[in-house]
Image (cartoon, grey):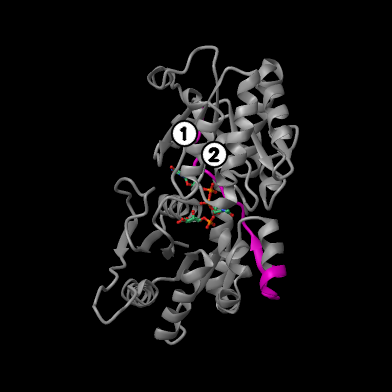
Amino acid sequence: MKLKIGISCYPTVGGSGVVATELGKLLAARGHEVHFITSSVPFRLDRVYPNIYYHEVEVNQYSVFQYPPYDLTLASKIAEVAKRQKLDLIHVHYAVPHAICAILAKQILNGDLKIITTLHGTDITVLGYDPSMKDLIKFGIEQSDLVTAVSDDLVKQTRALIATNKEIQTVYNFIDENVYKKLNVDELKKHYKIEEDEKVVIHISNFRPVKRIPDIIKSFALIAEKVKAKLLLIGNGPELAIARQLVNDFKIKDRVLFLGNQKHIAELLSMSNLMLLLSEKESFGLVALEAMACGVPVIGTNAGGIPEVIVDGQTGYLCDIGDVNCVADKAVSLLLDQSSYEAFSLRAMEHVQSVFHSETVVSEYERLYCQVIQK
Ligand SMILES: CC(=O)N[C@H]1[C@@H](OP(=O)(O)OP(=O)(O)OC[C@H]2O[C@@H](n3ccc(=O)[nH]c3=O)[C@H](O)[C@@H]2O)O[C@H](CO)[C@@H](O)[C@@H]1O
Ligand SMILES: O=P([O-])([O-])O[C@@H]1[C@@H](O)[C@H](O)[C@@H](O)[C@H](O)[C@@H]1O
C-alpha cells in the first residue's frame, strides 16, 4: 500500500532530525509520498528527491507576539497540509513541541489525523525532569495513536520519568548503507596533514553538557601520551569554548582539529581509527552507529542506550561515565594492536549490517503505519 506521510522534525543538525530525514528519503524511495512540514529544509535533504515535498512553517513575527509562535504555526500548518494533501498520517519526531502540535492539528481536523510520535533523547531524559514539562510530555505521548522510542533504555526511562502506561515500541535507529561505508580518503588525510603512522580519534556531537566534552579532551590527552594521534572534533555547541581551553591547558593544540559542523560525515569517519562517545545521557548514539558502519570501533559510556549499540569487547568498549583512565587504556590497547583492531573494525561493520539494517527498520515503520491506519 502506498501512503501519504507527513513528517515533522527539527531541521537543524542533530540526531532526531537526521533520523526523520533519512527515514523520509527511504520511504520516498519505496514509492510513498512524503511531506516534510518543518521550519526550514532539513539539513540532510540536500538535493531533489522524487516523492518528497517540503512545506515551510513560516513563523509569524507579528509585533503583538512577544515570542514567535513556532508551535502554533506548526500545528496550523500540519492541519492545513494534512487536509490539502489528504495525508494518511503524520509522523512527528521529538515529543515537545512536535507531538503537542500534531495533537492540536488533529483537533482542528475534528480527529481526522493519525499521529505517530518518536521519542529521541533529551525530550525525555532532560525535559522529563522539568515539572513544567512533564504533564505536557505525558499528554503528547498518551494522545498519540502510536509511540516509538529509539532504544529499550529510552522506553524504560520514559516509563520511569513520565509515569505512563501507554505502549511504547522500540524501533532502533539506522543508517543509509550507501552513504555510511569505508571510503578512500587518502587525499583528505593529506589535506589535514595526517601522517602515515598517525592514528585519528574522532568525536561528533552538539557539544552540549550531556556529551561530557571535558572527558573527551582528558581521555585524548592520556591517549596522546602513548600513541601518535590526532583528535578530530566535529560539531558545534555550548561546550566548545571549554574544549578549546582544555586543549590549551593540556598543551595538545597541535594534535586537535576543531572542524565545526560538517555535512560529509562518512568521509571524516573514513579518516578515523576510533570514535569516543562519553555522554552521561544518550538514548541511542547515532554517531556510534555511523562510525561502526564505516569500520570505526567506538569507546562509549555505560549510559542510556549506548550498550544497545556498542558490543563491549567486540565492536568497541564500554567504560563507566567519567572514567577517563578506562577510556584511555582501552583506546591505547586497540590502537596499538593492529590485528585485534582489524577484528574490531570488521565486527563493527557486520554488527551494523545485521542488527541495524535500514531495510529492516524502514519496513518496521511501514508495518506500524499500516497498523495505525487500520485501527
Ligand atoms: C543525548 C541524546 O539522547 N541524544 C539523542 C538524540 O540526538 P543527538 O543530536 O544528541 O545525537 P546523535 O549523536 O545521535 O546524532 C547527531 C547526528 O547529527 C550529525 N551531525 C553532527 C554534527 C555535525 O557537524 N554534522 C552532522 O551531520 C551526526 O552525524 C548524527 O547523524 O537523538 C538521536 C536520534 O534518535 C539519538 O541517537 C541520540 O542518542
Ligand atoms: O536534545 P537531544 O535529544 O540531545 O538532541 C537533539 C536532536 O535530536 C535534534 O535533532 C536537534 O535539532 C537538537 O538540537 C538536539 O541535537
Q: Nearer the viewer, residue 100 or 90?
A: 100
Q: Farthest residue in the bottom direction?
A: 110
Per the image, the residue denoted by label 1 is 266
- Disc on res. 255: none
Q: Looking at the image, which residue is at 55% across and 12% down?
A: 197
Q: Looking at the image, which residue is at 59% across and 47% down?
A: 285
Magenta stretch, main secondary structure, is loop
Q: Amino acid at mark 1?
A: Ala
Q: Amino acid at mark 2?
A: Glu
Residue 199 lies, in percent from the top left, at 56, 20
> How many residues crowd around disc 2 within 10 Å: few (fewer than 14), some, or many (20 or more)?
many
Are dots 1 and 2 in contact, CB under 8 Å? yes
| 1 or 2: tag closer to the N-terminus | 1
* Quadrant in which the C terminus appears: bottom right
Q: Nearer the viewer, residue 168 or 212?
A: 212
Q: Is residue 175 visible?
A: yes
Q: Which residues are magenta?
A: 159-182
